Amino acid sequence: MKAVRSILMNTYFGKLFRKDKFVFCIVFLFFLFSVVANAIRLETTPFFLWNLYAERYYPADDYSMYEIRYNNKILNFKHSWKQPQQILLMDPLLNYISVRHDHQPDYWHRYLEDHWAPMHPGFKSWIPNLSNQQAQYDAFPAWYVNYLSSIVNEPITDLAVLKKKLHYEKDGRIIEIASDTIRLIR
Amino acid sequence: MNITQRILLTRIVTGFILFFLILRFFEHATPSRFLAPPLFLVQLDIAYWLYKLADLPGLIVVNKTGAVFFDICLFLSGILLFFFPLRKIWILSFTILLFIYAISFNYFGMHHTHPLAGFMLILFPFWAADNVRFNMLWEGMRYYTCYLYGMSFIWKTCIGDSFFNWKQGIGSFKLNLVNYLYQNPDTLLSGFYRWCLQESWLINSGWILVILLEGFMLVGFFTKKFDALLFWIPVIIHFSTYLFANAFFIELLVLDFTFLTGRQLKKIDGFLVVLQSKLPGRYRTRQEKEITGDSIS
């Protein structure tokens, strides 16, 4: 028992406990919550889940992609360091397309309504405030045009999103198999 | 780590963060340039719920004046922290504003990404006025860096099982690079990627190697002997995922500075002294001069 205690007291947390109990409590609780968040798979910032690419990906021959066309030009995300901008341009757009074009319910709205609210009825009134409503979807195309216009530095008169089905050839080249146009403004 | 080294470390960390914030500003990815997006995502993250319910998005992003004011405060507090690294007000304000910025970006980007996680956490040890307390917190941050990569390894091997999928590397490669290859078929990089697709064993092996490197970071929990090596592992991981998975996690490398030892900081400081001696003068705040007894002005 003494040996275990001696080992523990020589660890980072042991030394911290001896030197500064206040800091020990903060650091220990931070690590504890971080581990627990990962164990129960529930992220609560700043207790992050580090699970990127933990699920399996298998190579396929066909993939889908969305291509944005404005004023007869193609928006090309050529550099990975532009990813923050790419996220702001693509992720809200994909959600909008899913809800408005494909008529799918917003995943998180449905989750909160169907699973979370029955377990926590006291918080049900919060749900409209925590998920996107029709008015927000209505406002999306105008914002998107405005935002993209500020990036490409020109007024946008025509904006379309093309959902493409692409195929990897044996030599690694990609050919287009199908394309579906979703027009945001004309 | 002494107070001079702490000053240098504050400047390295703040300079690194400011560089990427400026990049984000020019990429239209800071609140004043979001132009009030209507859609958002909170998921089940209580921090985002509080952010939304406190109406912070309305105040600092949707309101145009608020958004411009937020950006000014964010950049100004960072710049002032760089020049006055021991002033608590700039440390506190930059930490809080960075934290809010990261949540704002993920909230309106509708993607709770983690590249900004390092920015959100790294400045907390600098809150400690007492240098002994700072050193303890900084050491804790070093352990968190080891934990982060170690946990990523555990997710891929124990909680999830992607490590045991031999085709994982080529699977994520094809998925993440399909846009680039389609839109830029004639670049040199696309030619290289097509060669990689022929040699899929190389991509799959690289994927396994990256996971093993993540696992190796757990060594940092038991010894500091390998810190020089541990410093380079996240660099290898993030540059390889940048190149082969189109994932921009370079900002997370701010946590890598926790592996810098006092000796390395002394070397960097020595290098900067030589560099600055060639310039007309060396800038030191009055507070720094008092602490370090430095007569260089």
Image: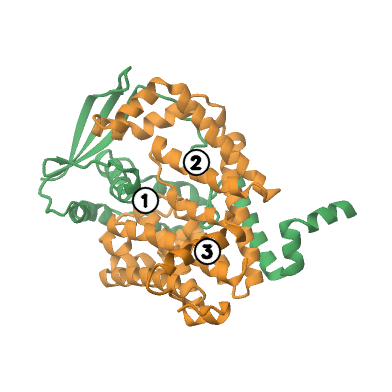
Q: Which chain is orange?
A: B
Residue sitting nearer the eye, A57 or B37: A57
Foreground tag (1 vs 2): 2
Q: Chain of mark 1?
A: B
> How far is the residue under mark 1 from the one under mark 2?
25 Å
The kind of residue on which mark 1 rests is Met
Q: Amino acid at mark 2?
A: Ile
- Label 3: element kind: helix
The chain in green: A
Q: Position of residue B10 (x, y in %)?
A: 50, 66
Q: Nearer the viewer, residue B258 or A63?
A: B258
Q: In which chain is the residue bearing label 2? A: B
Whichever of callouts 3 and 2 sits on the residue coming sooner in the sequence is 2
Residue A50 in view, yes or no: no
Please name the residue that numbered disc 3 is placed on.
B270
Which quadrant holds the C terminus of chain B? bottom left
Reading the image, the residue beneath label 2 is B237
Residue A119, above or below B290: above
Q: Earlier in the sequence, mark 1 or mark 2?
A: 1
